[in-house]
Amino acid sequence: MSRVLFIDFKEKELTAHIFHVRGNISEMKETRSFPISGQHDFSFERETGQIESAYVSLPAAWFNFRVIELPFSDKDKIRETLPFELDGVILGGSNAVIFDDVIVGKSGNAVQVLAVYIEKNLLKKVLDALHSNGIDPVHVTCLELRKKL
């Protein structure tokens, strides 16, 4: 049996869920909530020594979004081109953010690409705070965004 931690950040609080996983069966064993200040500061009072893996969902409000039209749909080519496209629309350029993309539409020979990005400094602050509490997430995502897409 393994213990899995899922941390769901919201605007004003984070909720930590501990699951016991055995094969394909998981059971939630504990849930605790902790406040988040306006500066994305939080205190996480949880013994994590027996957690095998941790997953984190950040709130959609911590991300920025841009829809960019490109004349190709090849995923590798999009990944290669996107930093140059974002440099013109992001204060500080694409080097100041961590981003991902998804194709959300097509018109003629072009595709609309949704670029989702978060400031590196904010993500680093969150990951450093988690790390100081013994938590090293294997995956960071945004569940709210998935629902919206």
Image: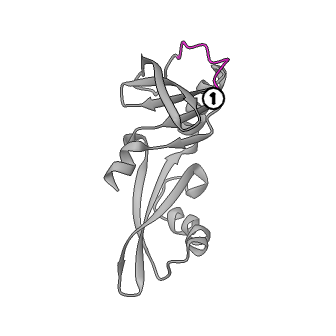
As for residue 50 lying within the magenta part, the answer is yes
Where on the picture, by quarter, is residue 134? top right
Q: Position of residue 80 (x, y in %)?
A: 62, 70
Residue at the disc numbered 1: 128
Look at 46% across and 28% down and name the residue there. 40
Q: Position of residue 61 (x, y in %)?
A: 37, 41
State left or right for residue 63 relative to residue 4.
left
Look at 51% across and 16% down and name the residue there. 43
Q: Which of the image's four quarters has the N terminus?
A: top right
Amino acid at the residue labelled 1: Asp
Q: Main secondary structure of the magenta part?
A: loop
Look at 46% across and 55% down and name the residue there. 116
- Of residue 18 and residue 24, the one placed in the foreground of this image is 24
- Of residue 124 and residue 133, the one placed in the foreground of this image is 133
| Span of residues in magenta | 44-52
Q: Secondary structure at mark 1?
A: helix
Where on the picture, by quarter, is residue 82? bottom right
- Colour style of the rendered protein structure: one colour
As for residue 51 lying within the magenta part, the answer is yes
Image height check: is 122 above or below 85?
above
Mark 1 is surrounded, within 10 Å at the Cα level, by few (under 14), some (14 to 19) or many (20 or more) other residues, namely some
Image height check: is 137 above or below 66?
above
